[in-house]
Image (cartoon, rainbow, N blue to C red):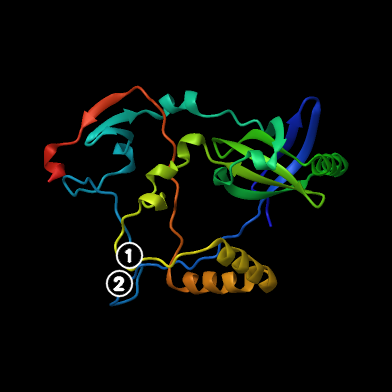
Amino acid sequence: MRPVWSGTISFGLVAIPVKLYHAVKKKSVSFNQLDERDLNRIRYRKVNAETGEQVSEDHIVKGYEIAKGRYVVVDPDELEPFMPVPTKRIDLEEFVLLDEIDPVFFDTAYHLAPDLDPKPYVLLARAMEQAGKVAIGRFVMRNKQYTAAIRAEEGRLVMSSLAYADEVVDPGDARGSDARNDEGGGEAPQAVTQGDLEEGLVVEERRGPAAATADAVEDAVAVHVGQVGRRAARGGGFEGQVRARPLAQEL
């Protein structure tokens, strides 16, 4: 497996060379759209949404929508000041307890492997594991800055990128999140007692891990559907030319 990033874990005067590997390998089935008459691939052209005419790369610019039909046209040079400077370092800022981090913030998981001399890596992993602490740091990968949490498990380091606070959805925005105010129709749910919950937990403990069942469900789903991209690029405030889309395009 090839590393997706390499650099150093840095804090104080310490610099530990590491390589970053994906901890999760997504498995999905993808499909191509074909012409049923000869099974040739379907290709797409970049066209003007108003005129339908094909547009060459020379005439394509980046625009940020500030209101419906109104865009800020951004020159690539305007983006430069907002791009993080690649440092090839994971700069650790603090050490906290794992339970101080809300699990909703955990995003993509990576394995951190030692590069060159493994001794500093082993010492850091051992010290963190004994202290029960998680390191919080920042790093830049593919022109984007990430906040990450590094924890030690059985002598190795695992890193998870963290979502930004403004990316986390407020639970109050989730429909039906407050069961006390749920006025949905349908059959009334059966009353659940504390004894029912305790008995259920005991049964689950006796069953043991349900990994095999989970794998089977994932495999079945992968046969029928593909993976959908879930994150859009984060935008910033840029100054530029504001253009309004023609009203005819709204029709």
Q: Is residue 110 left or right of residue 122?
A: left
> Where does residue 3 sit, x and y in percent of width and height?
68, 50
Q: Residue at x 42, y 68 (%)?
A: 31
Q: Residue at x 60, y 43 (%)?
A: 161
Q: Amino acid at mark 1?
A: Ile
> Where does residue 217 sit, x and y in percent of width and height?
53, 72
Q: Is residue 231 left or right of residue 125?
A: left
Q: Nearer the viewer, residue 108 or 52?
A: 108
Label 1 SS: loop
Q: Which mark is residue 139?
A: none
Residue denoted by label 1: 42
| Depicted 215 relative to depicted 19: above or below | below
How many marks the image carries: the answer is 2
Q: Residues within 10 Å of mark 2 (few under 14, many from 20)?
A: few
> Where does residue 179 sit, x and y in percent of width and height?
41, 53
Q: Residue at x 43, y 57 (%)?
A: 228
Q: Is residue 232 left or right of residue 56?
A: right
Q: Quadrant of the N terminus?
A: bottom right
Residue 37 falls in image quadrant:
bottom left
Label 2 SS: loop
Q: Nearer the viewer, residue 203 or 149?
A: 203
Q: Amino acid at mark 2?
A: Asp
Q: Is residue 34 left or right of residue 133?
A: left
Residue 126 falls in image quadrant:
top right
| Depicted 86 relative to depicted 172: above or below | above
Residue denoted by label 2: 35
Q: Are marks 1 and 2 in contact (CB under 8 Å)?
A: yes
Residue that extends furthest to the bottom in the rendered view of this protein: 37
Q: Nearer the viewer, residue 64 or 48?
A: 64
> Where does residue 247 sit, x and y in percent of width and height?
12, 38
Q: CA distance from mark 1 to mark 2?
A: 6 Å
